[in-house]
Image (tube, rainbow, N blue to C red):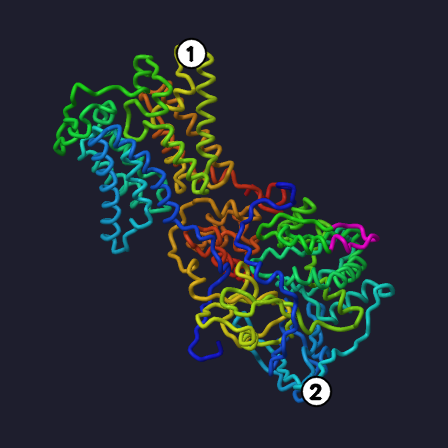
């Protein structure tokens, strides 16, 4: 659908973008922490299985863990160094997960290991899928879903359109923006791999109107032999959710509890495409990623290429934070998760680190009022749920009614309802908890 | 950062909020009502001032006392009961005995709001509940009007204002009929510009259409009022009464008169739009407005009372939960009928 000339979806919200401080800063290489902790669970699916031993020396980019089945990916050493131990480490979820503790060699040139290239021209789709799994590629937009899994098109299904998601609607984050500006070549190579695997004929690169330089650059460099275009979309949250992209760009809706495949479309984050385009020709794996480190509490804000496994504490020490910092999030402020500990590591799914001070937190300290049925949430929900009614049902623990009559399970937790709620009701959190209960009841 | 003793707050996303707040919204509604209240005081002098003050004080005190009696923190700080008080006061005849004003205020807030569970749970507009009780209990006092802009309105009070509790008020010879009553009972039309500017008799707040519209537009511009509701009410009243007027202009009032007279402006802008009692879906708001407009014209035209806005809105309030259910939008990705259930 179109409004004011630019495509968009219906409903949604307009949080302050807060991107100006970092969108102009070029990507910089981040130093190695004295100890890198690489969790073996960085993706949705089965934990990877370590293929190295304690005390072993590894080279940067060397595979240190292999996929455990199809719903899993490989892991690679973020630095040349010594495997100190393989043990549990804290994760963002609060659970302890298995991890590889790696001590980088000081003074090492940190050359990345050469691998077996996966040539674009001669590789078959199945070989490309295997190469993507071997490269440890997961969705870098934040969900960290193994990319090769969604590229495996089941028999009888087909994809006609590939959407490359450069929306980055999450406030504060500018990683995709910088990747588009600095890695356009990689992006187009990645697109060619993705088109070959999926059999899609057409590609659309979706960019929000607040990144005109990226749209212009990619439009200019768009290869003439590719069928597709760069589409500039209206700035609105959560435009970057793939469901919103499909309805805005294709006028198609993913069926409830269905997959994008059901509407012959596939969406891939632009940074993921860039990684594929960069890694596959070299036969390498993901060992670092671009992350925006920002927020009112951060002193040297920027876009950094950070080794996977960098501990949050080291990262914040390097960029410097205000003394009154009191909240740190992995990701942006709309969907990011609060870090409960600074001992967790940067993983493949971390698109940003945002830190807030006490004063900046003021607005979320406000008093909670009863729901006044103002309907702001109803006008905000991008999938047309009624968060107000859902909230009232959640308060009385009517979880099955929420799921059966109010489409609770369709909520993808964008947080638009909580954002607009003048009563400051933690709606999306109530829905997360309710979904857990519904799943439990379903499993029982 | 790394130093000991630092604590991190863990909250769930989203970590930024729009900054909107219930008390901000309610306070802005109070602001939008103030010019209307000021005009009422200007038009009706001391009587207007006392009526409004008594209405606000009785409502606010009732909520405060009930909260405290229940052992809960007072909720008067969210400003919602101040709105109730102002709206309630603005719907009353300015010469209403003050003890009656107090009785209606207490009943409106206690019965119409607190008993239902307080803010957010009050199915019916508490201001209108209070007024409806008075209408039933004191029909004569509730339909005795003094003309506005009387000389000496700032130095003297109508006889009725200070009537002792539980006694029947006496009225000066000065009481006059409202434009709606004039039309209903003697087919006498009132000048349109007088209606718009408020140079008529009536309840304290129903007299200035212009100020009411301005207040509403202020709130709509700040996204604190759902424009669909007043627009739907006005459109329905205009269309329905316009059709009747075309059939027989001598029997039916003109649509302009219908729109500008009585409590329609205040009711449509400030009472029907009370967030708690109105639907949340867009289509629900249109239907709700149409229903209120329709019932208002029906009561005014064929009912026994000259005015019907109050009952129309209360009826709309009652139907709101159903309207929300009937007009639920199709959820993204829902297949066919699945969406409706």
- Circle 1 packing at 10 Å, graded few (<14), some (14-19), many (20+), is few
Q: Name the residue under label 2.
A: A57
Percent of width and height locating residue A59? 72, 82
* Residue occupying image coordinates x 30% and y 50%: B77
Return the chain for callout 2. A
Looking at the rendering, in which quadrant would you find the C terminus of chain A? bottom right
Q: In the rendered view, would you say B46 is above or below A27?
A: above
> Please, what secondary structure does the residue beneath circle 1 have?
loop
Q: The magenta stretch spans which residues? A: A218-229
Instruction: Indicate which disc residue B249 carries.
Output: 1
Instruction: Identify the subunit bearing mark 1.
Output: B
Foreground residue among A166 and B127: A166
x 81%, y 67%: residue: A127
The question of residue A105 being in magenta is answered with: no
Left or right of A411: which side holds B193?
Answer: left
Which SS class for mark 2? strand
Marks 2/1: CA–CA distance = 98 Å
């Amino acid at each position: 659908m179109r409004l004011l000339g630019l495509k968009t979806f219906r409903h949604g919200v307009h949080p302050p973008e807060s991107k100006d401080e970092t969108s102009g800063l070029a990507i910089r290489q981040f130093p190695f922490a004295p100890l890198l902790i690489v969790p073996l669970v960085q993706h949705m699916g089965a934990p990877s299985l370590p293929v190295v031993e304690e005390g072993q020396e590894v080279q940067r980019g060397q595979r240190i863990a292999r996929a455990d089945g199809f719903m899993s990916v490989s892991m690679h050493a973020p630095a040349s160094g010594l495997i100190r131990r393989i043990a549990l480490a804290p994760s963002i979820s609060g659970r302890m997960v298995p991890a590889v503790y790696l001590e980088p060699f000081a003074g090492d040139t940190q050359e990345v290991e050469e691998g077996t290239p996966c040539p674009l021209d001669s590789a078959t789709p199945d070989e490309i899928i295997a190469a993507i799994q071997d490269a440890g590629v997961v969705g870098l937009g934040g969900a960290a879903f193994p990319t090769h899994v969604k590229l495996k098109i089941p028999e009888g299904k087909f994809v006609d359109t590939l959407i490359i998601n450069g929306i980055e609607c999450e406030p504060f984050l500018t990683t995709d923006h910088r990747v588009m500006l600095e890695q356009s070549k990689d992006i187009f190579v990645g697109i060619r791999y993705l088109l070959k695997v999926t059999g899609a004929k057409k590609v659309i690169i979706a960019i929000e109107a607040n990144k005109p330089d990226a749209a212009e650059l990619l439009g200019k460099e768009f290869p003439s032999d590719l069928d597709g275009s760069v589409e500039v979309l209206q700035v609105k949250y959560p435009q970057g959710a793939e469901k919103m992209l499909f309805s805005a760009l294709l006028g198609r809706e993913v069926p409830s509890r269905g997959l994008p495949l059901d509407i012959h479309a596939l969406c891939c984050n632009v940074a993921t495409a860039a990684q594929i385009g960069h890694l596959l020709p070299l036969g390498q794996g993901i060992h670092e990623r671009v992350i925006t480190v920002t927020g009112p509490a951060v002193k040297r804000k920027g876009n950094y290429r950070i080794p996977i496994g960098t501990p949050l504490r080291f990262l914040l020490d390097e960029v410097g934070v205000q003394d009154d910092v009191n909240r740190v999030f992995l990701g942006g402020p709309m969907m990011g998760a609060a870090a409960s500990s600074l001992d967790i590591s940067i993983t493949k799914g971390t698109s940003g680190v945002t830190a807030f001070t006490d004063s900046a937190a003021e607005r979320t300290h406000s008093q909670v009022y009863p729901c006044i049925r103002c309907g702001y949430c109803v006008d905000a929900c991008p999938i047309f749920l009624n968060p107000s009614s859902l909230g009232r049902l959640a308060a009385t623990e009517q979880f099955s009614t929420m799921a059966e009559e109010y489409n609770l399970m369709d909520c993808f937790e964008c947080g638009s309802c909580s954002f607009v709620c003048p009563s400051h009701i933690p709606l999306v959190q109530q829905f997360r908890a309710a979904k857990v209960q519904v799943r439990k009841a379903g499993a029982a | 950062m790394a130093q000991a003793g630092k604590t991190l707050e863990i909250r769930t996303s989203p970590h930024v909020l729009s900054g909107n707040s219930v008390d901000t919204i309610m306070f802005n509604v109070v602001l939008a009502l103030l010019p209307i209240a000021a005009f009422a005081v200007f038009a009706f002098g001391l009587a207007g001032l006392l009526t409004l003050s008594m209405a606000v004080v009785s409502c606010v005190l009732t909520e405060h006392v009930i909260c405290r009696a229940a052992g809960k923190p007072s909720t008067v700080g969210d400003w919602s009961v101040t709105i109730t008080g102002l709206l309630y006061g603005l719907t009353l005849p300015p010469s209403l005995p003050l003890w009656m004003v107090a009785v209606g205020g207490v009943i409106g807030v206690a019965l119409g709001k607190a008993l239902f569970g307080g803010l957010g749970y009050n199915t019916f507009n508490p201001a209108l509940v209070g007024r409806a009780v008075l209408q039933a209990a004191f029909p004569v006092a509730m339909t005795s009007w003094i003309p506005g802009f009387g000389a000496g309105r700032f130095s003297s009070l109508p006889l009725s204002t200070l009537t002792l509790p539980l006694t029947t008020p006496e009225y000066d010879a000065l009481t006059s009929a409202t434009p709606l009553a004039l039309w209903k009972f003697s087919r006498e039309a009132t000048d349109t510009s007088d209606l718009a500017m408020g140079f008529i008799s009536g309840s304290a707040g129903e007299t200035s259409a212009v100020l009411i519209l301005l207040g509403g537009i202020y709130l709509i511009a700040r996204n604190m009022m759902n424009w669909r509701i007043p627009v739907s009410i006005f459109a329905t009243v205009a269309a329905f009464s316009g059709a009747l007027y075309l059939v027989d202009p001598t029997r039916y009032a003109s649509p302009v008169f219908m729109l500008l007279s009585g409590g329609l402006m205040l009711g449509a802008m400030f009472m029907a739009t009370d967030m708690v009692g109105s639907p949340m879906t867009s289509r629900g708001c249109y239907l709700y407005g149409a229903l209120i407009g329709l019932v208002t014209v029906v009561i005014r035209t064929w009912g026994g009372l000259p005015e019907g806005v109050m009952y129309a809105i209360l009826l709309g309030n009652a139907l709101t939960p159903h309207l929300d259910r009937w007009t639920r939008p199709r959820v993204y990705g829902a297949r066919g009928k699945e969406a409706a259930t």
